[in-house]
Amino acid sequence: MSTLKPFLIRTLQLLLVLWAVVTILFLMFRLMPGNPLAAYIDPTFTAEQQEALIRQFGLDKPLWQQYFTYLGNLLQGELGDSFRYRTPVAERILLLLPNTLILTFSSLIVAYTFGILAGAWLAWKRNSRFEAAALPAVLATRAMPEFWLGMVLLAIFSFSLGWFPAGGTRSAGTSYDSLWQLYTSANFLSHLFLPMMTLAIYSQGLPLLLMRSNMLDVMKEDFVTMAKIKGLSPSAVVIRHGARNALLPVMTSFAIAVGYQLQGNVVVESVFSWPGLGRELVNAVAASDYPLAQGAFLMIAIVVITMNLIADLLYTFLDPRISHA
Amino acid sequence: MAETLLSIRDLSIAYEVGSKDVVAVSGASFDVPQGTIVGLVGESGCGKTTMARALTRVIADNARIDGGAMQFDGQDLAALSERDMNALRWRDISFIPQSAMNSLDPVYRVEYQIIEVLRDRGGMRKAQARARAVELFEMVGIDPGRLRDFPHQFSGGMRQRAAIALALALNPKLVVADEPVTALDVIIQRQILDQLRGLQRELGLSVIMVTHDISVVAYICDRTVVMYAGKVVENCDTATLLNEPLHPYSMGLKNAFPDLQSAGTGVLTPIAGSPPDLIDPPKGCRFAARCPFATDLCRNTEPALTEAAPDHHVACHRASEAAVLRETAKDPATWGAVT
Ligand SMILES: Nc1ncnc2c1ncn2[C@@H]1O[C@H](COP(=O)(O)OP(=O)(O)OP(=O)(O)O)[C@@H](O)[C@H]1O
Ligand code: SF4
Ligand SMILES: [Mg+2]
C-alpha cells in the first residue's frame, strides 16, 4: 500500500526525535552543577557510604559508559528509583499517566468538538450580529490565563455552588475493584469535570478560529460554487463539501494542541491537585528528585511525539492528495 | 427553424462595488434555439461568465440581476422562486466550468461526485447511479477504471472530460459551458470539442459555449453572440459571422485569433486599446474609442441592437456600410494606430 512507506518514514523520524530527547535529558541531569545525589544522600552518611552509593548509581564511570548504561536501562523500561519515594520511577509514572491522558484527551475532545462546530457555525453566520458578539468572547477566552480560569471555576462551581469537588481524582475513602471501574465512576468524572473544562475552555479558541477562517476560505472555492450550481441541499454544500475540506488543517493543529495541553496541564493539575505527570514533574524538580523528573519528562515527550504521529496519520487518511499521491 | 429553448431579453446584471455598480451585463438579448450550440464570445471582462452564471442563478454575493427576462422552456428564470430554481438546477440546466481542477472536490473520488449528483438530484439508487457513472465515463472517453481516482490523479484533459460527464449526468436540456477548453493545449482542445460536438448531436443537446477565442466559435458553434463591454453587439449564425460580419468589433476579433484547424498560419492583428470602465461607461457606442470607423454620431449616441438582415442582429450605426468596412478591416494597418 502506498500509505505504508510514509508511515514507516515518519515512525523512524519520530524515533530519532525520541532518541534526541533522551540524550538531552541524560546530559541535562548529568551536567547540572552540584551533586546529583545531594538530595538522596543523608548528611549523616559516612564518606564510605557516600562512595558506595555513587558506585551503586554508576556515577564513578566515564560519561559515555553511563550514557550506554542509561540507554540500555531505558530500553528495558528501567528508569531508576525515585529519590523521594524510594520506589521505581516507572511504577510511579505508569500510575499517573492515565490521569494525565484522561485529562488531556477529554479536554481536547471537548475543545475540538465544540470549536469545530462553533467555528463552522460562525462562518455560516458571517457578518451577523451573532458573530459580532461571539468573536470577542472567543478572543477573551484565549486571553485568560489558565490558573486564573481554573480558580474562577473552582470558586464558582466548587466553593460557592458546591456542584463539583475541589480537587483530586476521587473522594477520600472510596475504593474501586479495577481502574476501569474507577475511571467510569461518577465520583471520578465529577472530579474530572472542572479541570477538564478549564483546559477545554482554554483550548477551544484555536480550533474554533481555525475552523472559521478555513470555512470562509473553502466556501469561496469553485467546488463549493459548483455544489450550489448542482442544486445540492444547503447542508450538503456546507457540511459535505465546505466543512469536510475546512477540517483538514484543524486536524494538524490537534498535534500541536496536545503539546500545548501537556504544558498547560502542569498549571491545571496543580490548581486542581490532579495527580498527573505535570504536577509530578513540578514537584519532582522542586524536591531535586532527578530520576522522577527525568522519567516524567520522558513520558510527556513520548506522549507528544506519539500524538504527532497519530495526527500525521489522521491527516494523511483525511487528505487523499497525500494518501493517494 | 428549431424551437427556441432559451430567450434572453434585456438582461442586466450589476455587481455592487462599494457604493458604485459595475454593470457587467447591460440590456443583453439573444435566443438559444433547441439543439444548437450557441457561442458567447468576447474579450476578457466583457461579462460572459456573469451572463452564464446568471442562467444558474448562482451568482456572486455582490451581484444582482437588475432587470430583464430569461425565458427558459416556458418559465422566466429571473422570476422563479429560489426553491423552483433549485429544482431546475442541473436537471435542466447544467454547467461546465473553466477550471475543472478546482471545481471537483479534492477530498472525494470522482465516482462519488458523479454518484452524488445522480442520487441527490436524479433520485437514483446507488447501484443504478454506479452503472450510469460508468456509462458517462465511456461517453466522454475516460476509462471507467479511473472512476475511483481522486481529482488530483487526473490530467487536465481528463478533468475537463469528467466535468462534461458530470454536466450530462441528468440529461439536461441546456448545458452552459464557461470556457471549457481554455486551460488546455490545442490538441486536447480539439479532441474535447469534437467529443462535445458528437455528444451534442447524439443527445440533441442545447449548449451555450462561452469563449474568448473566435476559433473555438468557428470550430463548434452553430450560432454566435458577440459581446462587448457588457452589451450584445452582434448575433447571427456562425458562418455569417465569419464571412460577413456587420460589426467592426467582430471583424477585428477575426483578425486577432489563429484558426483551430490550421493553427499557426496567417498574421494576427490584435485590436489596440482596452475596453471601457464598466463603472462609468462612455455615452455613445462602447466600442468607439477603439473602432477605426467611429464617427461623431458613434461617440454621442448609443446604437441599438437591430435586425439588420434576416436573423442577423447588430448594434452599429454603420452596419449598412459593412461590406465596404470589411474590406478596410482586412488591412492590418486599419487596426494599428487607433487613438
Ligand atoms: N464579484 C465581482 N465583483 C465586482 N466586479 C466583478 C465581479 N465579478 C466580475 N466582475 C466584473 O464584471 C465584469 C465582467 O466579468 P466576467 O467575469 O463576467 O467577464 P468574462 O467575460 O467572463 O471575462 P473572462 O474572459 O476574464 O472570464 C468584469 O469587469 C469584472 O471585473
Ligand atoms: S457604432 Fe460606430 S463606433 Fe460603434 S462599432 Fe459601429 S462604427 Fe464603430
Ligand atoms: Mg469568464
Image (tube, helix red, strand yellow):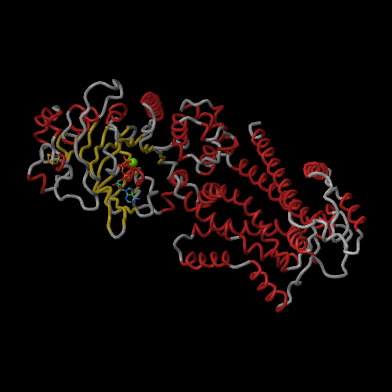
Residue A232 image offset from top left, x and y in percent? 49, 47
- Residue B248 left/right relative to A183: left
Residue B98 image offset from top left, x and y in percent? 39, 37
**Furthest-front residue in view?**
A47
The residue located at (51%, 67%) in the rendering is A136
> In the rendered image, which quarter contains the C terminus of chain B?
top left
- Residue B79 left/right relative to B128: left
Q: Is residue A277 above or below residue B284?
A: below
* View quadrant of ligand 3: top left
**Furthest-bottom residue in view?**
A160
The residue located at (73%, 46%) in the rendering is A22
In front: A51, or A247? A51
Residue B168 image offset from top left, x and y in percent? 44, 34
Residue B134 image offset from top left, x and y in percent? 54, 29
User: Residue B251 falls in which quadrant of the image?
Assistant: top left
Q: Is residue B134 above or below residue A133?
A: above
- Residue B250 left/right relative to A232: left
> In the rendered image, which quarter contains the N terminus of chain B?
top left
- Residue A72 left/right relative to A221: right
Q: How many marks?
A: 0
The residue located at (54%, 35%) in the rendering is B150
